[in-house]
């Protein structure tokens, strides 16, 4: 049973606008969350993370929001750029255990010039 | 500094044959992980090494899969005999400690005909 879900397989956004990628999880023991970005024929690369003691983490154009009560997190990209076009994976791990990450199925973002 | 390297990048074999995938982690990274993405679905955990020891192999699908990490350096993942459902992209990742960030290789795409 999939514990991390990304229900939108794809998203298309105009350059300069905001991209919002969503992720839901079912395991209440998850307390550390990450977003990875993946270009074709490359491995996923770390983008941004958040622990459950926070509800927001910002890094440049990227902000991750965590809503623990709803078991939901989102990644905001503002402003979106064509180079952001990639597949974005949400991942989570349980309390104190970085040994095993649970990934979603990914959302393919297309930023149109 | 070299990143995580995986070989081969693509392997096409027939059902019943054997394939061995290799991963060279980033030098000095004690933690090595194998993940798999099948048919565009989520990236699933297979197993985790700390140096040469298997820390967690709960994600290994069945006994047709054998992972080793002799000497705590590179790792191999052998599939014998391969089945059609083993097709997918096998990612290797490494991390220096339990930092919560994984460094992924480009993946080895396995196609079983």
Image (cartoon, rainbow, N blue to C red):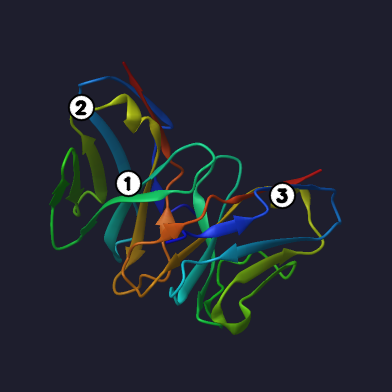
- Residue linked to disc 1: A24
Front label number (2 vs 3): 2
Front label number (2 vs 1): 2
Q: In the visual, does B19 lie left or right of B45?
A: right
Dot 2 or dot 1, earlier in sequence: 2
Chain ID for label 2?
A: A
How far, Cα to Cα, is label 1 from label 3?
A: 27 Å
Residue at 13 percent of width and 50 percent of height: A56
- Residue linked to disc 2: A18
Secondary structure beneath disc 1? Answer: strand
Percent across and percent down for residue A23 are 32, 44
Chain ID for label 3?
A: B
Secondary structure beneath disc 3? Answer: helix
Q: Nearer the viewer, residue B88 or A26?
A: B88
- Residue linked to disc 3: B85
Residue A7 sits in which quadrant?
top left
Q: In the visual, does B52 lie left or right of B11?
A: left
Chain ID for label 1?
A: A
Percent across and percent down for residue B104 are 46, 56
How far, Cα to Cα, is label 2 from label 3?
A: 38 Å
Are there few (<14), some (14-19), or many (20+) residues within 10 Å of tag 2?
A: some
Are there few (<14), some (14-19), or many (20+) residues within 10 Å of tag 1?
A: many
């Amino acid at each position: 049973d999939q514990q991390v879900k990304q229900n939108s397989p794809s998203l298309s956004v105009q350059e300069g606008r905001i991209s919002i990628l969503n992720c839901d999880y079912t395991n209440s023991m998850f307390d550390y969350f990450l977003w990875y970005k993946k270009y074709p024929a490359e491995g996923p690369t770390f983008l941004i993370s958040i622990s459950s003691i926070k509800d927001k983490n910002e890094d440049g154009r990227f902000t991750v929001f965590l809503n623990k009560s709803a078991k939901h997190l989102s990644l905001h990209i503002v402003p979106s750029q064509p180079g952001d076009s990639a597949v974005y994976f949400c991942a989570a791990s349980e309390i104190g255990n970085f040994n095993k990450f649970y990934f979603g199925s990914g959302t393919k973002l297309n930023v149109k010039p | 500094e070299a990143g995580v390297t995986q070989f081969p990048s693509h392997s096409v074999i027939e059902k019943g044959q054997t394939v061995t995938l290799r991963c060279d982690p980033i030098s000095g990274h004690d933690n090595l992980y194998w993940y798999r993405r099948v048919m565009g679905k989520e990236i699933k955990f297979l197993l985790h090494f700390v140096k040469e020891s298997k820390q967690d192999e709960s994600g290994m699908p069945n006994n047709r899969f054998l992972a080793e990490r002799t000497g705590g350096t590179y790792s191999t993942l052998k599939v014998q005999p391969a089945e059609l459902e083993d097709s997918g992209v096998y990612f290797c990742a490494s991390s220096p400690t339990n930092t919560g960030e994984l460094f992924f290789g480009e993946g080895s795409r396995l196609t079983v005909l």
